[in-house]
Image (cartoon, rainbow, N blue to C red):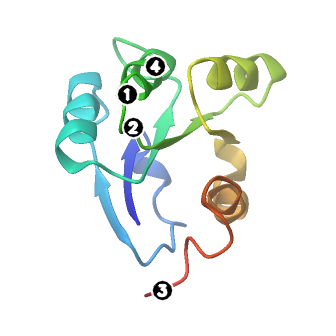
Amino acid sequence: MHLVLVGLSHHTAPLEVRERVAFADDEVQAALARARSERPDLMLIDISMPGLNGLAVASLIKAREDSPKIVMMTLEDGEGYRRSALAAGADAFLAKNDFARDLRDVVHSVFGPFAMRPS
C-alpha cells in the first residue's frame, strides 16, 4: 500500500505501517502534485490546510477517475465535519485525537482487513 499524508507531518510517530509512505508538504499544490505523480492507494488529508482547505483538496483529487482512497482528518470531531468530509468525497473520517488508536480500523474499513498485513 502506498500512503500520502497531507498536512499531518506532526502525526506520523504512531504510524506503524510497513508499506511505503510518502509525505507531501503541508501545501495544497504539493498535495495535488503528489496525488498525480505517485498515484497513492490512500491519502490522509487534514481538513485545515493553508490556502485551499483539505475538503477542497479532497474534491479535486476525487474528481480524477483513478483517485486514491481518502481519509479526512481534523482536530474537531463533530458531525458537521464528518458530513462535510464525506460530501467532499472522502472515504472515511478520523479525528486526529484518535489517530494512533483508530488508523488501522479505518484502513480496514476502507480496504478490508488484509490491507495492512506485511507482504
* Residue depicted at x 27% and y 27%: 27
Labels 2 & 1 near each other (Cβ < 8 A): yes
User: Closer to the N terminus: mark 2 or mark 1?
Assistant: 1
Amino acid carrying label 4: it is Ser
The local crowd at label 1, few if under 14, some if 14 to 19, many if 20 or more residues have their Cα within 10 Å, is many
Q: Is residue 17 above or below residue 7?
A: below
* Image disc number at residue 61: 1
Labels 4 & 3 near each other (Cβ < 8 A): no
User: Closer to the N terminus: mark 4 or mark 3?
Assistant: 4
Q: Which residue is mark 2?
A: 67
> Which element carries disc 4, helix, strand or loop?
helix
Labels 4 & 1 near each other (Cβ < 8 A): yes
Q: CA distance from mark 4 to mark 1?
A: 6 Å
Q: CA distance from mark 4 to mark 3?
A: 31 Å
* Image disc number at residue 59: 4
Place of residue 61 in the rendered image (x, y in percent of width and height, measured from the top left) = 37, 27
Of the residues tagged 2 and 1, which is closer to the observer?
2
Quadrant in the rendering for residue 34? top left
Q: CA distance from mark 1 to mark 3?
A: 27 Å
The total of numbered circles placed on residues is 4
The quadrant of the picture occupied by the N terminus is: bottom left
Q: Which residue is mark 3?
A: 118
